[in-house]
Amino acid sequence: MFRKLLTIEEAKTTIRQHFKPKPLGTEQVPLLQATGRILAENIIAQLNIPPFDRSTVDGYAVRAEDTFGAEETRPIQLELAGTINIGELPHVKITKGKAAEIVTGAPTPQGADAVVMTEHAERTDNTIRIYAPVVKDENIMKASSDIKKGQQLLTTCQPLGSREIGMIAAIGKPTIKVYKIPKVAVLSTGPEITEPGKRLTPGKIYDINAYTLSSAVTEAGGSPLYLGVIQDNLQQLQRALKRGLAQADMVITSGGVSVGPKDIMPSAANTLGKPGIIVSGISIKPGKPTTVASVFGKPIFSLPGHPASALLVMHLLARPLIQQLAGKEPQQSPQTKAYATARLFPAKGRRTYIMVTLKRSETGKQTAEPLPTSQSGAITTLAKADGYIEIPENTQFIEKDEQCIVHKFR
């Protein structure tokens, strides 16, 4: 039996007391490999972007005052002084009555302070007729107008996506300092579990948990290390857990944590080092038999074998630690409001999490439709669930059509 069921708040407090997760160090990686990583340095621009005044259109670089008065019926004529190509410095100077052909992105020449679009000009040999006036700086992107030298572009602990990578590339950095990715060992237990790819014999099922949990580790910012399916044997479990602790920063297991004769995962985890088991059962549904151990400062999260239960507890307890080890701020689940499509009852005396799918009613309001609470072992529960509704222990029920908060998985 479980020593003492903790509330979910007590379990979280106990975990915080034993683990003070910090980033695991930094490494320099090529910029092309930095997408999805967490920045470990402030990014300061070492140059202006653009580094020169540049044309934003194809057309003619001019002195704006030379175009004043130009009309469709009375064009102003300018003399062609030369051509400016992209990727090279201009070799012409614009003086009164002169213009230079220019392409988008090319540096504007000395003396020019505007660009007339090709659509508003006409060229015959070396004569340019201007049919519409421009004002100073029109169609020009000024030097440093995008990024100024010395400007802080990005801050440490910021996730790197396509936009951030583009900003770093703009200032010419080929590599970037990021936090190391925490390794999380994942294993499943149970005589009925078979690894995908192997022949499924009678009485067996394929391993769901290792794959859903490994994917959840990746989503949290970690790198999963799959240790396979381990039989319910004390020595085998101890060896697997030791291997996981040696190779990873955290271990997550599923199955073998209830009160049956084969549920020996807590015993295995409790023999590996002090203090051992720190959480032995949580007053929640689903997820009551969840066990957490601390071994040499590393956590072992032993989750229930039911897929929906395992993924929920992973989301509630293990995910924040992985995020902190990866240099991320623990992120709250996105929330949305929806109306319950049925009366929802909590388990007596336990915090209850009811998986729901979000839909739109005929009137357009968002609804939360509960998935069967008796099917935490069904993979379709995972596939269909958009999130969960949390019902506190002291709440009798949530009424049908009552508005409630849905914690979204994504």
Image (cartoon, grey):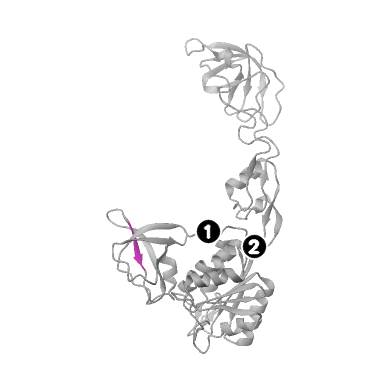
Is residue 23 a member of the stretch shown in magenta? no
Q: Secondary structure at mark 2?
A: loop
Which residue occupies 54% across, 12% down? 68
Magenta region: which residues?
A: 366-370
Which residue occupies 40% across, 57% down? 336
Q: Give the percent coordinates (x, y) of residue 119.
A: 52, 22
Q: Amino acid at mark 2?
A: Lys
N-terminal label among 1 and 2: 2
Q: Label 2, on which residue?
A: 22
Seen from this angle, which residue lies furthest top?
A: 74
Where is 255 relative to 78, above or below? below
Q: Is residue 215 visible?
A: no
Where is 358 relative to 150, above or below? below
For this view, does 357 lie left or right of residue 155? left
Which residue occupies 66% across, 18% down? 111
Q: Label 1, on which residue?
A: 331
Where is 202 relative to 342, above or below? below
